Image: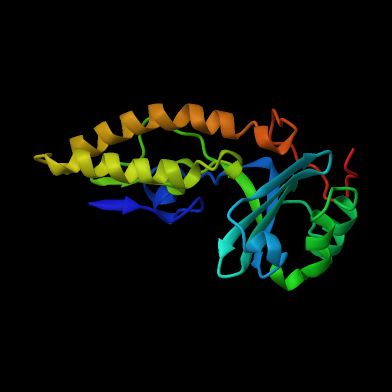
Amino acid sequence: MLVGADDHASAVRRAVLAPAPAADCGWATWQGLTPALPDLAAGTAGRSFVGDAGFVGLMPAGGGLLQWWFDVPWCRSAPRPPSPVTWLRRRFAHYAAPVPDLLAAVSDADIALYPHVRHAVPTRWGTGPSTLVGDAAHAFPPTLAQGASQTLEDAWLLTRALRTAAHPVPALRRYERARSARVRPVSRLAATELTTGRRTHSPGCWPAACPPR
């Protein structure tokens, strides 16, 4: 039996299900993990900011580290700014403290870009003794924090389906039917980018240089 758990660009998905890549959702996350804002990093509560430029999240990660991210309109075909941090400083300059303080403290070496993508969620996730779990089966934007949650549910239900199965193939198809029904509405809701402050109804390509308004 083969279980593909190799992310949204899954080679297993391309081989056993569909060659089409995950589609852009029109947003992306610039994020990092650094020893910034020590008072906030040492605490136990995160902070979030929603405004016209996008969504900002700040979350203590332990060991004096702060996880931080900026959700902005974006698509993979858009050119990347020469200096992402400089671009973010201009875009989020009017946000409340400590957002400007964070951006003043980090560099381009600290930041990585993660485009928001989404797979269609079919009823069948494999052929014969093969199936998918996690982003390989159902990548969607991180705005509802459901990627890891739905992956854990995949693993739990797949284990249950196989535990008493006489043969894996019928069990895999039962697992896929149950999970696709569960994941499909989560995927649709996540694709609205609800928590970013704006809704995107189609995967349009928004230029990186677009002003906040």
Question: Would residue 34 be seen by someone viewing this image from the given angle?
Answer: yes
Viewer-proximal residue among 198 and 94: 94
Residue 107 percent across, percent down from the top left: 78, 71
Against 25, residue 115 (above or below) is: below
Residue 131 percent across, percent down from the top left: 32, 45
Question: Would residue 74 be seen by someone viewing this image from the given angle?
Answer: no
Viewer-proximal residue among 38 and 29: 38
Q: Which colour scheme is used?
A: rainbow
Dividing the image into 4 quarters, which one contains the C terminus?
top right
Viewer-proximal residue among 210 and 46: 46
Residue 163: which quarter of the image?
A: top left
Residue at position x 61%, y 41% from top?
Answer: 143
Q: Is residue 25 left or right of residue 134?
A: right
Residue 90 percent across, percent down from the top left: 90, 55
Against 99, residue 145 (above or below) is: above
Residue 168: which quarter of the image?
A: top left
Residue at the outermost left position: 166
Residue 44 percent across, percent down from the top left: 58, 55
Across the whole image, how many numbered discs are drawn on residues?
0
Residue at position x 18%, y 42% from top?
Answer: 162
Residue 190: which quarter of the image?
A: top right
Residue at position x 67%, y 57% from top?
Answer: 68
Q: In this view, does 152 lie to the left or right of 169?
A: right
Residue at position x 83%, y 53% from top?
Answer: 97
